[in-house]
Image (spheres, rainbow, N blue to C red):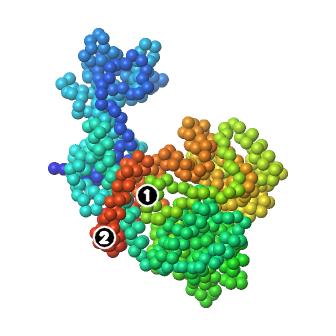
Amino acid sequence: MKFAPSTPVSEVSWIPRNRVANLARLGLHTLADLVSHYPRRHEDRSHFGAFPEAATDQPVLLLGRITKASYLPYGGWKRGFEATLEEEGRGPLGGRISCRWFNMPYVGKSLAVGLRMVVYGRTKLRGKKVIIDFPEYELLDDDSAPDALIHLHRITPVHPAGEGVTPRKLREWIFRALDATDLARIESLIPGETTNAARTHALRAIHFPDSFDDLESARRTLVGEEFFAMQALITSRRTHVAGLPGTARTSPGTLARALHASLPFRLTRAQNRAIREIAADLAAPRPMNRLLQGDVGSGKTLVALTAALLTIEAGHQAAVMAPTQILAEQHFATFNRLLTPLGITVALRTGSKTIDPEDAPLFAPDQTHPRGGLVVGTHALLYDPAVLQNPGLIVIDEQHKFGVLQRAKLIEHPAGPDVLVMTATPIPRTLAQTAYGDLDVTTIDELPTGRGKIITGIREAAKLAAAAEFLRAQLDAGRQAYVVYPLIDESEKLEAKAATAEFEKWQPLLTPHACGLLHGRLKPDEKEAVMRAFRDGATKALVTTTVIEVGVDVPNATVMLVENAERFGLAQLHQLRGRIGRGVHKSYCILVPGADTPEAREKLGVLEKTTDGFLVAEADLRLRGPGDLLGTAQTGLPPLRLGDLLRDTSLIQQARDLAREIFSADPTLARPEHAALKTWLATQHARFRTLAS
């Protein structure tokens, strides 16, 4: 009798009780979890080779008989064990390998002269002796064939492991679980579909395939299901939002034209195209749910401000949400300067600050909601019902700093507002079709003219003094600089520099130029004072953390030095670099890795070669993989376990087309009250952590 997939791993005999907690830390609680714990790679251990006479770059699989076995002295009380393996079936022409294990006393208890053994590992030479240290091995009876081996003589899976759980042990337990579990009862990710024979075979073959063709077929079966489940959820959101009641907000555009005429530059063609797309959404009798993406400095904020003016002129309130108080206050100052001549009032709402125009407050004491105009704030706006009483447009700046639940809260607002989310982290097309597939996408793919060029270079930590001299020379010339660190305070666990400690070193280095210190643990009024001094030019250098990552705009800042640069993500470094090059002067970004490794060079080299955020995003996707970029917190979607956004574009498109076909045929499926969809989403909630509820 087979076990039910829901059987806890603690109830099966082949998993030791003292390893159940280790499995739980990997998220493996049931047999269904275990058989769905897919390998991160497979190794071709399927063919026996001739015994090599030299060192090998790749592991080799060898079959032979032990002709000598003995313990070896190994430093004090530690002991080693050596077994000499001779090639079977070739007589005096056969090869000979010495297999060695150190500080593993149990190996010597299981190996003896005369036993047949399969080993797998890389060989090396010691004089004329060919050696494999710590090989994987399995013993064979004289009359047994090696075909039944779990670890060797097959295409072998290597599963993600953890503390107390080795890949070898996981392989054994999953092998047993596949045989002992009723795989046909494992719930499919596709609603209404029972597990069929093809999927049951795929669950086995994704772990222990008969061939690489078999492995690829299994992978496509499971990846197709994974992408369809994801696209069904995305399309249900999109269909649901499209069916929500909305308000057509049309205006003659007088205020927008007046704003554009007051600017000392002309909008780019890409900005004008974006404004037309957004204006069409505002005028439609359905809620807008649009993503505005563009590279750092492409002018997204001006496009959003134009959308706000169109909304205000149509008689509705507009709100702009920023992820940090620093960015919210900067937006407030900029909007006030641009809109006051047009007679538009701007208010500020953050967790610690409220500012209303003195002559025409948006919030009078006897009012329950603002008069018209624009309110700027942080996520605190979400939790102040007096502010978002009847919004017409809500703009979310740097939307990747907000979670999908916060965006859903806005979209579901009773007033049916139009929602525009913005990001300066360009999104590769395949990622946009998954993480943001429920949004319409507008791309600003053009930068304004007149911006200073940014030159990026990698410098060794040993040459930091020369980099500091260059920074000082730029300050002497009247420019300003950022010095960025990954930590606020020094840590015993992390070998990385910290802003507070390094600030003490930079002050004497840059005298007489004043330095400021900015990080996330400062109180809001302290942050504001530090940023004001830097914007006004009283402070010439700002020693800081990633608190400046988004939105900080000081055109005179032309130098950025990032220490321990390899500890930041590519997209994050590109965002940080976007704080310079915002004026007419040439700018310089100096990346100083703490560890000069090939991986760090490859990653940072991307930024040396290009300032194009879309190319940086593609490289980030390639280097980090989709698992890190698709996550529950920001998208409400599961990290991909098998799917590859670069490799599986055709499957993504097929899944997307199928999901849209289903919801086009029956849009009512997307309604939250629809029993079938709600039940399906609820059953998947534990696995996917979606927006089911």
Which residue in the structure is indicated by mark 2? 666
Residue 397 vs residue 285: left or right? right
**Above/below status of 233 relative to 417:** above
Query: Eyeballing the image, is 463 above or below 202?
Result: above
Q: Residue at x 71, y 37 (%)?
A: 463
The residue furthest bottom is 366
Q: Residue furthest left?
A: 1
Q: Residue 13's image quarter?
A: top left
Q: Position of residue 608 (x, y in %)?
A: 62, 43
Q: Can residue 2 be seen in the rendering of this structure?
A: yes
Callout 2 amino acid? Asp
Query: In the image, which disc is placed on residue 204?
Result: none
Q: Is residue 135 left or right of residue 436?
A: left
Give me the residue at 70% from left, 47% from top: 588
Q: Which one is nearer the viewer's eye here, 674 or 17?
A: 674
Nearest the eye: 287 or 175: 287
Of the numbered discs 1 and 2, the one sitting upstream in the chain is 1
Residue ranking furthest to the top: 92
| Left or right of residue 351: residue 51 | left
Q: Nearer the viewer, residue 161 or 59?
A: 59
Residue to which mark 1 is pinned: 433
Q: Quadrant of residue 125?
A: top left
Q: Quadrant of residue 596?
A: top right
Q: Residue furthest right?
A: 512
Compared with 542, 341 (above or below) is below
The percent coordinates of residue 48 (x first, y second) are 30, 25
Q: Secondary structure at mark 2?
A: loop
Q: Tell me which residue sits at (36%, 35%) in the image.
A: 43
Distance between the alpha carbons at the discs numbered 1 and 2: 21 Å
